[in-house]
Image (tube, grey):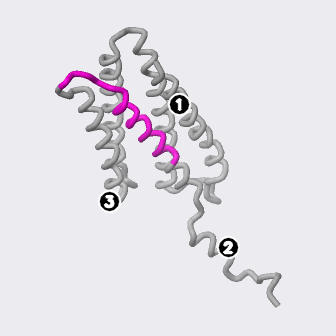
């Protein structure tokens, strides 16, 4: 199946993003060695999304060992991925550090979960690869977004390093 090759490629990307977590750990701590609650949640989310994407990329070939029916394969995998996305979205909504914007950000994964549910319980009974791929790409994309949010330096912090410093090139 060509779908398996696509999933393996996405799994490699997801694992690479998760591998950058070690760099984030090394450079993101505050001076007191602690993390802010929001950064800790972002770091955890980056790992969960990356490893979830990798796991669900490897899942279909494993399930394919037990069934030759491709519709059943994508139905089983879509159901498991949809349940995982729903559970993760619920946990994120309940985090103490979640604000209104974080909760609004749960709309895309809930739409992905609905698409996966339609793939499982659709009227024609023919589950397909496309909706499953949407769920996988959601995890991969979100892992990358959380990585970016962790490594970015807020503008206020950059400005605080330049305020009061004399420019050596000024005359």
Q: Which residue is mark 3?
A: 100
Circle 2 — which element?
helix
Q: Position of residue 137 (x, y in %)?
A: 44, 38
| 159 sits left or right of 85 in the view | right
| 122 sits left or right of 74 in the view | left
Stretch of the chain drawn in magenta: 124-144
Q: Position of residue 30 (x, y in %)?
A: 61, 58
Q: Which residue is mark 1?
A: 11
Outermost residue, front side: 2
Is 38 part of what is drawn in magenta?
Answer: no
Circle 3 — which element?
helix
Q: Residues within 10 Å of mark 2 (few under 14, many from 20)?
A: few
Q: Earlier in the sequence, mark 1 or mark 2?
A: 1
- Tell me, yes or no, whether the two marked residues, 2 and 3, touch with CB atoms within 8 Å: no
Picture residue at 38% right of the left edge, 36% below the top: 135
Is 132 part of what is drawn in magenta?
Answer: yes
| 129 sits left or right of 148 in the view | left
Q: Which residue is mark 2?
A: 161
Position of 62 relative to 48 (above/below): above
């Amino acid at each position: 199946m060509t779908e398996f090759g696509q999933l393996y490629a996405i799994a490699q990307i997801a694992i690479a993003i998760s591998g950058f977590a070690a760099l984030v750990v090394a450079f993101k701590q505050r001076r007191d060695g602690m993390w802010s609650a929001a950064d800790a949640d972002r770091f955890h989310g980056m790992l969960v999304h990356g490893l979830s994407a990798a796991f669900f990329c490897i899942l279909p070939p494993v399930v394919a060992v037990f069934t030759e029916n491709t519709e059943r394969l994508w139905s089983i995998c879509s159901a498991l991925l949809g349940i995982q996305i729903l559970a993760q979205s619920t946990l994120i909504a309940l985090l103490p550090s979640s604000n209104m914007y974080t909760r609004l950000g749960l709309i895309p994964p809930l739409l992905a979960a609905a698409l996966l549910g339609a793939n499982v319980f659709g009227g024609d009974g023919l589950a397909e690869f496309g909706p499953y791929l949407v769920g996988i790409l959601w995890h991969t994309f979100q892992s990358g977004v959380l990585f970016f949010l962790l490594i970015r330096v807020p503008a206020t912090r950059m400005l605080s390093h330049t305020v009061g410093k004399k420019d050596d090139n000024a005359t």
